[in-house]
Image (cartoon, rainbow, N blue to C red):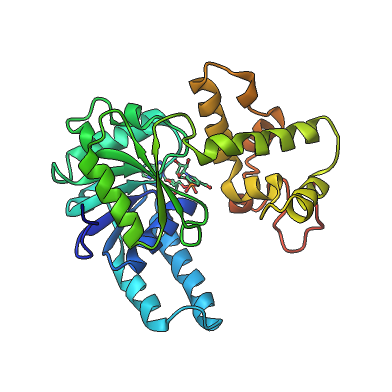
């Protein structure tokens, strides 16, 4: 089975932290990428963020100016979903809500060719459920990148019950062509990485709720002594508390309320305050450059 050809158009829906990064990965691999976001100005912001990041790398001599310019040419902002009609692969990276994803996939079926692949970057939702009810559920599969998508090598290729072998194989080879390291998983709650990582966040949050220690100390201990690249709180701030909380809830619900996966009230409060982490400038830490750290 072959990877998607370089001349194939890729579309990305949702231009937030993940969608913009995935667009960058596909554009660097040579595809024209159509980037769409339902929020006014968000796709332009996502594209500019990618280019600003690449400009910094070029300045440091870590990225070719010519490739940066090619990426700029290849990422095209879409005004509406209809602009995605030529896409051979669509990667959805919108909000982690099943009903919203299902409605976007239903609309997509009206737009793209019957044999175009529809992939979801969902962290935790059932790929089977996202595909259910579509005319062609066999062309839906998970293509789950990690944050930040241009840096992290791992990609989970997730099969739903109806996903065809051909679609899964094409995604696997495409991820390889995009210089990623794909692994196969089936549509179980949280797949592999998010399932195994749940206790990392949950126990960190419980330690905090039980006042065993503070945010910065727990992060430092796990990073410096535990050998993790990031402590649980700085990692949740990077992921975004809205996303991380939604993923925990979805895994908890999918396992019929198994207390191992119980969401945290402290994190729920952060979401309620819109302290979502780096993306809103404040989470467990305050990212305002003038703020004293840590804050919580
Ligand atoms: P984000 O909040 O940064 O971006 C989501 C974007 O989707 C926003 O720009 C929003 O305007 C847009 N959007 C929402 N509903 C839409 C719709 N109906 N149509 C078009 N655009 C819409 O979220 P993030 O972090 O990029 O997450 C996106 C997806 O990727 C979620 O499914 C999440 O679970 C998954 N994911 C997140 C990771 C992370 O570390 N943040 C890691 C891996 C997967």
- Describe residue 228's horizontal placement relative to residue 195 as left or right: right
Residue 210 can be seen in this image: yes
Q: At x 19% / y 38%, what residue is drawn?
A: 109
Q: Nearer the viewer, residue 44 or 98?
A: 98
Residue at image position (54%, 76%) is 56
Quarter-wise, where is residue 4 in the image? bottom left
Q: Residue at x 57, y 47 (%)?
A: 239
Looking at the picture, tell me which residue is in the foreground, 262 or 286.
262
Task: Identify the residue shown where x is 53% and y is 34%.
Answer: 247
Where does ligand 1 appear, by image quarter?
top left
**Where 137 falls versus 255 (above or below)?**
below
Decide: is 289 above or below 220. Answer: below
Residue 203: image location, x then y, percent: 72, 34
Which quarter of the rendering shows the C terminus? top right
Would you place residue 29 above or below residue 121 in this image?
Answer: below
Percent position of residue 43, x then y: 39, 56
Toward the right, the furthest residue is: 212
User: Which x, y percent locates residue 165?
Assistant: 23, 39
Residue 262 appears in the figure: no
Q: Residue 126: which quarter of the image? A: top left
Q: Position of residue 256 (x, y in %)?
A: 52, 16
């Amino acid at each position: 089975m072959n990877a998607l050809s370089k001349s194939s158009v890729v579309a990305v829906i949702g231009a937030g932290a993940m969608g913009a990064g995935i667009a960058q990965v596909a554009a660097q691999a040579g595809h024209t990428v159509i980037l769409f976001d339902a929020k006014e100005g968000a796709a332009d912001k996502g594209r500019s963020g990618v280019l600003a990041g690449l400009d910094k790398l070029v300045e440091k001599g870590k990225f070719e100016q010519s490739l940066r310019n090619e990426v700029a040419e290849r990422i095209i902002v879409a005004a509406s979903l209809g602009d995605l009609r030529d896409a051979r692969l669509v990667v959805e990276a919108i909000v982690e809500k099943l009903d919203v994803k299902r409605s976007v996939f239903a609309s997509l079926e009206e737009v793209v060719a019957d044999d175009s692949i529809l992939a979801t970057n969902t962290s935790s939702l059932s790929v089977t459920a996202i595909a259910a009810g579509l005319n062609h559920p066999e062309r839906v599969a998970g293509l789950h990148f990690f944050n930040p998508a241009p840096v992290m090598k791992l990609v989970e290729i997730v099969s739903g019950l109806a996903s065809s072998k051909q679609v899964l194989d094409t995604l696997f080879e495409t991820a390889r062509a995009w210089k990623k390291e794909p692994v196969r998983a089936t549509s179980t709650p949280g797949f592999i990485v998010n399932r195994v990582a749940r206790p990392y966040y949950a126990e960190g949050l419980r330690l905090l709720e039980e006042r065993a220690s503070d945010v910065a100390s727990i992060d430092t201990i796990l990073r410096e002594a535990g050998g993790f690249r990031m402590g649980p709180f700085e990692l949740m701030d990077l992921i975004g508390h809205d996303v991380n909380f939604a993923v925990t809830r979805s895994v908890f619900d999918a396992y019929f309320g198994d207390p191992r996966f119980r969401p945290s009230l402290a994190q729920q409060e952060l979401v309620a305050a819109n302290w979502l982490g780096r993306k809103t400038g404040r989470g467990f830490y305050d990212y305002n450059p003038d703020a004293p750290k840590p804050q919580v």
